[in-house]
Every structure is written in C-alpha cells, then in structure tokens.
Image (cartoon, rainbow, N blue to C red):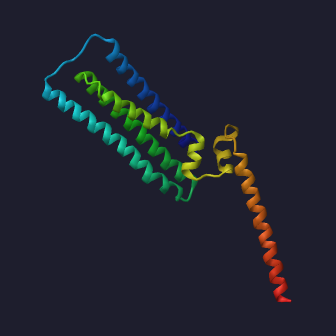
Amino acid sequence: MQKYIKKIRRSSNFGLFGSIAVAMVVILFVVISKHRFYMDDGSYQRFLIAGLMIAVVDISAVLFSVRKQIPRFKQLSSIEEKLRSYASLMSQIYYGTLIAVAMVIGIVVLSNNTQLIMLLVLMVLSLFFLFPNMYKVKVDLGLDNTTMKQLYGDAYVADKVEEETASEMTESALTEDDSTTDTTNIKNC
C-alpha cells in the first residue's frame, strides 16, 4: 500500500509545483519581457476561445470527478482498492491539469492575451484545494486512526477528540449491552 501513497505524493507534488513553476514563468515573461507575439483580431479571438474552453473544461472535469468519484471510494471494501483508486484519480487530476496549464500558457504567450492569466491562476488554485495531505486522504477515503497509523506511521498524529469519542462510544455500547442483559434477565425471572 506504500506504493500507492508514494504515487499520490509524487503525482500531486509534480503536478502542483510544475503548474506553479510554469505559471510563474509565463507571468514573468508577460510582465518583464519586451518580446511579444502579435496576431490579427480573428486569430486573437480564436486563441481566446480556445484558452477559455481548455480552462473551463479542465476545472469542471476536476470538480466533477472529485464530486462523483470520492464518495464511491468510501464504499469500496478493501483499503488497497481505496488507495489504488484514489492514487489513480489524483494522478489523472494533477497530470491532466499540468497539461492543460501548459496549453493555456502556450496560448497566452502566442496570442499575448493576458486575460487568460486569471483562468490560469484559477486552474492552479484548484490544485491547491485538492492537494492530498494525509488528513485529507483520511477524510476522503473514510479511514480510521489505526489504519492511518499503519499507513503513515509516526508522521500521523491522531485527533484526541476523535479518540476520546471512539472510546466513549465503545464504553456506552458496553454499558448498553449490560443493561439489556439485566433487563432480559429480570423479564425471564
């Protein structure tokens, strides 16, 4: 299962930091460089529409896939299946968005269209919100503290409130079992 955790880390780090790096390069190029590409109005509009479509399709695909896929992962039976599916989804999201960012950057540079930089920033921002740290993985996959300790070891710090609630629930369940047994014994007498 550690290979899936490494895959999640690798794809998310590469996709996020790669997108940030190329976005910063193009922003600096637009701001600092004196070199510009110019084109006629018809080509400029086509490039603008193409950049808009790429950004909108990417952001909506990311949000739609997260909304539809993550609740399904919680219903899978084994932890390995959950992690494999989650790692695959994160790879698709981060590598796909990196490719989309590179395409929009190409359009920004070739058309000298600075309006698309806003959408570029939104694409990178969506990757920030989805970044899968260990606590987000726990929530997304519906894992418990013992499983998280097995997966992440000492790096995972359990929530004290959750541990206390779990121990109180087991104590109350034991108390309820004792009280129902006592009530049953009284009725049998």
The foreground one among 114 and 148 is 114
112 vs 179, left or right, is left
Quadrant for residue 158, please give it. top right
Q: Quadrant of the C terminus?
A: bottom right
Residue, x 67% and y 49% (percent of image)?
145
Left or right: residue 183 versus residue 151 is right
Q: Position of residue 122 (x, y in %)?
A: 39, 34
Above or below, comparing residue 44 to residue 158 in the picture: above
The picture places residue 116, in percent across and down from the top left corner, at 30, 29
Looking at the image, which is closer to me, 121 or 76?
121
* Residue 95 left/right relative to 136: left
The quarter of the image holding the N terminus is top right
Q: Residue at x 23, y 22 (%)?
A: 110
Q: Residue at x 76, y 56 (%)?
A: 167
Image coordinates of residue 74 in percent, x first then y, are: 53, 56
**Toward which corner of the image does residue 6 lie, by quadrant?**
top right
Residue 143, placed above or below residue 127: below
Taking the spot 22% from the left edge, 35% from the top edge, the residue there is: 49
Residue at the outermost bottom position:
189
**Where is residue 154 drawn, in percent x and y?**
70, 38
**Vertical comparison of 179 with 58: above or below:** below
Farthest-out residue, right: 189
Q: How many marks?
A: 0
